[in-house]
Amino acid sequence: FGIARKVSAKANVYSYGILILEVFIGKKPTDEQFDGEFSLRQWVAEAFPVAISDVIDSHVLNESNTTSTERSAAMNELLVMFMEIGL
């Protein structure tokens, strides 16, 4: 909507994806880190899926901090799924 000034299903899907990324990343697309050619979506895409924990908000990771390797692997898989939806 922001650029084209038109409401469409594609714009809604894109916005929903960005919202998911914002929730798990803890950054907004307007953060000064994302200027010009470099966007929030590109930042996550570069980390996906191998280094996804590098871009996830530390608060999300702290909530999921556990000693169980199995649960940790399950949480990582869940985060990758959410990031895939966001992307």
Image (tube, helix red, strand yellow):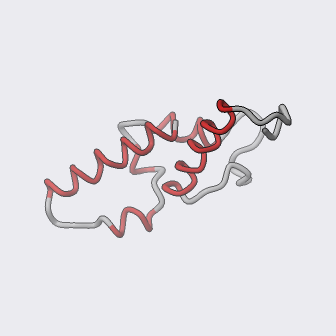
Above or below, 22 against 62 in this view is above
Camera-nearest residue between 18 and 59: 18
In the image, is 56 to the left or to the right of 78? right
Q: Residue at x 37, y 62 (%)?
A: 61
Camera-nearest residue between 79 and 57: 79
Q: Residue at x 53, y 57 (%)?
A: 23
| Residue 57 point in image, percent of width and height | 48, 60
| Residue 77 point in image, percent of width and height | 28, 45
Camera-nearest residue between 78 and 27: 78
| Residue 51 point in image, percent of width and height | 39, 42
Quadrant of residue 14 in the image? top right
The total number of labels drawn is 0
Quadrant of residue 41 in the image? top right
Q: Residue at x 69, y 35 (%)?
A: 11
In the image, is 27 to the left or to the right of 7? left
Above or below, 61 against 75 in this view is below
In the image, is 8 to the left or to the right of 64? right
User: Which quadrant would the N terminus be assigned to in this image?
Assistant: top right
| Residue 18 point in image, percent of width and height | 60, 45
